[in-house]
């Protein structure tokens, strides 16, 4: 008979082996997917709450793997981050957006927002990528980078932030209110925009405590003169509430779901007519 403690450690070792094995087997398809163009760039419109015009888009990655299954970004983005593949994936996204600039209106102030992982800020890599890929295309639209509060402060050096600002890049804090270092982070990053996490938008009219937090975030942003984008806007009630509180911009299924980048101009033409 095996003692129970030995049995437990054997079981644990097997579990760890299986888990790490499956991680490795998922990392390979990501690199394969990048080289075989399995990743697609989607866009979701961002709407000015005052005049209802589309003033920008957020890009979101989609992946249909070689077995033709859709893999959620909530699965492949963390994996790509763990395996050092997120920089390559984001670089591919920046290239794709740069190759498709003609889908965006040339109206001044229109922006394209991309999600950037913490690692991409190491060794100035994101600054270099923007300089090498984005700037040479001389885009008429602006670029916005979305960082979450999970991005470690030490990785964000003042030098990089000031270089990005000099290049005219806008900075947004994503999922604002869900992290833990919000206020010190605000000071370091000096962002242009705060994105209110969809959990707070969802609380409007349903959850008094979170709705209070939502109001507090709105007040904070307005006192600091920061623009606000509310995410996950799904209902007319949320639109009315956010408009009344002068939240600048709205994003969510109420207006449009994320769509393939090449579909965006078709959506926009129809939206502007209505
Ligand atoms: P996120 O940056 O917070 O993106 C917003 C998510 O909310 C997207 O999910 C979007 O499809 C979804 N969404 C938009 N409007 C609504 C709405 O009205 N209701 C609801 N329930 N959801 C809405 P998605 O595309 O599945 O992406 C999930 C997360 O994966 C993103 O969250 C982001 O953190 C990450 N992600 C996606 N694409 C990229 C990428 O290219 N690079 C990086 N680093 N992360 C990405
Ligand atoms: Ca985002
Ligand atoms: Ca978000
Ligand atoms: Ca999110």
Image (cartoon, grey):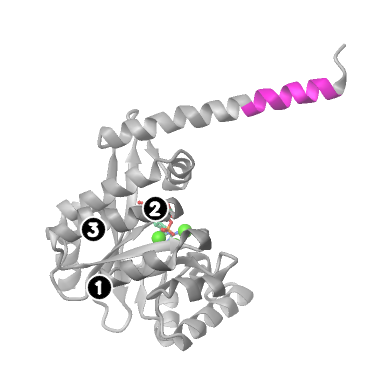
Distance in Å between CA atoms under marks 1 and 2: 32 Å
What label sits on residue 55 in the rendered view?
A: 1
Q: Earlier in the sequence, mark 1 or mark 3?
A: 1
Q: Residue at x 59, y 80 (%)?
A: 212
Report if residue 194 is visible in the image. Answer: yes
Q: Main secondary structure of the magenta part?
A: helix
Picture quarter with the N terminus: top right
Residue 257 part of the magenta-drawn span:
no
Judge left or right: residue 42 versus residue 75. Answer: left
What label sits on residue 131 in the rendered view?
A: 3
- The residue beneath circle 2 is 123
The boundaries of the magenta stretch are 5-16
User: Furthest residue to the top?
Assistant: 1
Which tag is nearer the camera, tag 1 or tag 2?
2
95 up-or-down from 48: above or below: above
SS label for mark 1: strand
Q: Residue at x 59, y 73 (%)?
A: 210
């Amino acid at each position: 008979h095996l003692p129970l403690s030995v049995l437990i450690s054997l079981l644990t070792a097997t579990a760890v082996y299986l888990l790490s094995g499956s991680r490795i087997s998922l990392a390979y398809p990501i690199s394969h997917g990048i080289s075989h163009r399995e990743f697609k760039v989607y866009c979701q419109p961002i709407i000015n709450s005052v005049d209802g015009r589309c003033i920008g888009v957020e890009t979101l990655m989609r992946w249909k793997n070689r077995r033709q299954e859709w893999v959620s970004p909530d699965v492949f983005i963390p994996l790509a981050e763990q395996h050092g593949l997120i920089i390559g994936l984001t670089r591919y996204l920046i290239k794709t957006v740069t190759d498709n600039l003609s889908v965006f209106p040339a109206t001044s102030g229109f922006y394209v927002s991309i999600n950037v992982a913490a690692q991409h800020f190491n060794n100035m890599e994101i600054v270099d990528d923007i300089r090498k890929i984005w700037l040479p295309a001389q885009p008429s639209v602006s670029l916005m980078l979305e960082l979450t509060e999970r991005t470690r402060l030490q990785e964000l050096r003042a030098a990089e932030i000031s270089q990005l600002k000099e290049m005219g890049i806008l900075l947004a804090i994503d999922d604002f209110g869900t992290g833990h270092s919000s206020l010190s982070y605000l000071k370091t990053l000096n962002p242009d925009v705060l994105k209110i996490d969809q959990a707070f938008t969802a609380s409007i009219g349903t959850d008094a405590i979170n709705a209070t937090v939502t109001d507090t975030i709105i007040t904070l942003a307005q006192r600091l003169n920061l623009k606000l984008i509310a995410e996950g806007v799904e209902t007319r009630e949320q639109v009315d509430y956010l408009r009344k509180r002068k939240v600048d911009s709205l994003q969510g299924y109420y207006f449009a779901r994320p769509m393939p980048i090449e579909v965006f101009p078709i959506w926009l033409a129809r939206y502007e007519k209505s």
